[in-house]
Amino acid sequence: MTSTASGLILMTVAGVANATFALPMKFARRWAWENIWLAWTLFALVFLPVAAAIVSIPSLDAVYRGAGAGAIAIVMLCGAGWGLAQVLFGLSIDAIGIGLTFSIVLGVSAAVGSLIPLIRLQHAVGGFSAASPILPGIALVLAGVFVCAVAGRMRERAQGSEKKRRSFGVGLAMALCSGLCAASMNFGVAFGEPLLRSAAAHGAAPQQVVNAVWLPLLMAGALPNVAYCLYLLRRQRSWVNFRSQQTPAYLALAMVMAVLWFFSTALYGVATTRLGELGVVVGWPVFMSLIVVTAGILGIVTGEWKHSGAAPLSLQVVGMLLLVTAVVTLSRAQRRASVASQSHSSSRLTLEIEMRRE
């Protein structure tokens, strides 16, 4: 099996796991959102990253000293930005609705999260020509996410679930900021190369070096989530929920959520290393597409589209097909770009040899 094929398989598993991580929340009926989300945050963004880094990265202190404070600060800044995106995402849903929020947040995140690493890559290949096939794939991602969002909005109206919302302008601004900040996770992986190199130099396995990035990135991402949950716990007076008899069972559900989410996130990092130079460029929109497709299938299976009519469900299927097409397009684009990049590197080496001979 080729490295690209194994990377795409790992990316698929990661996307499915990520799409299903929130299902246990449906069973924590006597806890408020902030109760289960705080427990998930502590497990997924603090406990598991620390444990994974300690177990898989030898000489962890030396790894971070070797990477330098500047590289760690950049990764943590990206993590804090991603954590802020989760808070803004929830607020924008209340303001402009689920459908529009998903279209803006996922669309902006997919596009920005892929294009910025692509800009960095163009310096290595001398322009965008080697990576240009990726652009149609990103366009398909945006189109698919938008169609799915419209279908969701139609479903809400058909089911009579529209809520009273805040100012559209404020909600739109929050959704745009959430999409921009959500891409920060991909930036943390893309700009965390000094940590990856330092971990490898100290003996970490190739598939485990990304844990050196997840630790500072996710712990920084936990800060906005914890702060917002504490605010809600105080405002809603929902601290008392932790005293219920169901608390041990609900904590177990939060741990299941954390394991599914962290497993998918860690597997995403491993998959990007298998996809070559364009791993973070191709991997991000592919990962997001798989999440949307899997979530769409789960929604249909669990009856979320009942009583919504044929039109919204048909539109949802069209959006999912667009996203599947995007996955295929981006995987083929990655292969072409890798070949072009190797050809470019070979040409440069040949030129350097000829110049030395002269």
Image (cartoon, helix red, strand yellow):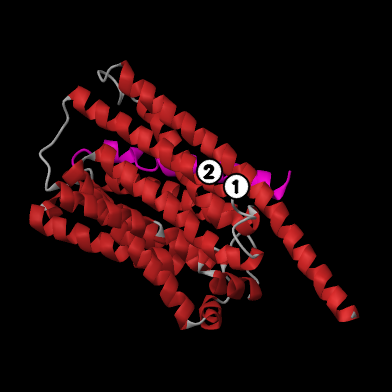
Place of residue 172 in the rendered image (x, y in percent of width and height, measured from the top left): 22, 50
Q: CA distance from mark 2 to mark 1?
A: 6 Å
Residue at 23%, 43% in the rendered image: 246
Label 1 sits on residue: 133
Left or right relative to 61: residue 358: right
Residue at 61%, 62% in the rendered image: 127
**Quarter of the image that includes the C terminus:** bottom right
Image quadrant in which you'd find residue 234: bottom left
Q: Is 313 above or below relative to 326? A: above
Label disc, if present, on residue 162 of the rendered structure? none
Mainly helix, strand or loop, the magenta region?
Answer: helix
Left or right relative to 280: residue 29: left
Identified by mark 2, the residue type is: Pro
Residue at 33%, 42% in the rendered image: 103
Residues in magenta? 1-30
Q: Mark 2 and 1 residues: CB-CB less than 8 Å, in contact?
A: yes
Q: Is 279 above or below relative to 193? A: above
Q: Is 162 above or below relative to 59? A: above
**Quarter of the image that includes the N terminus:** top right
Q: Secondary structure at mark 1?
A: loop
Label 2 sits on residue: 136
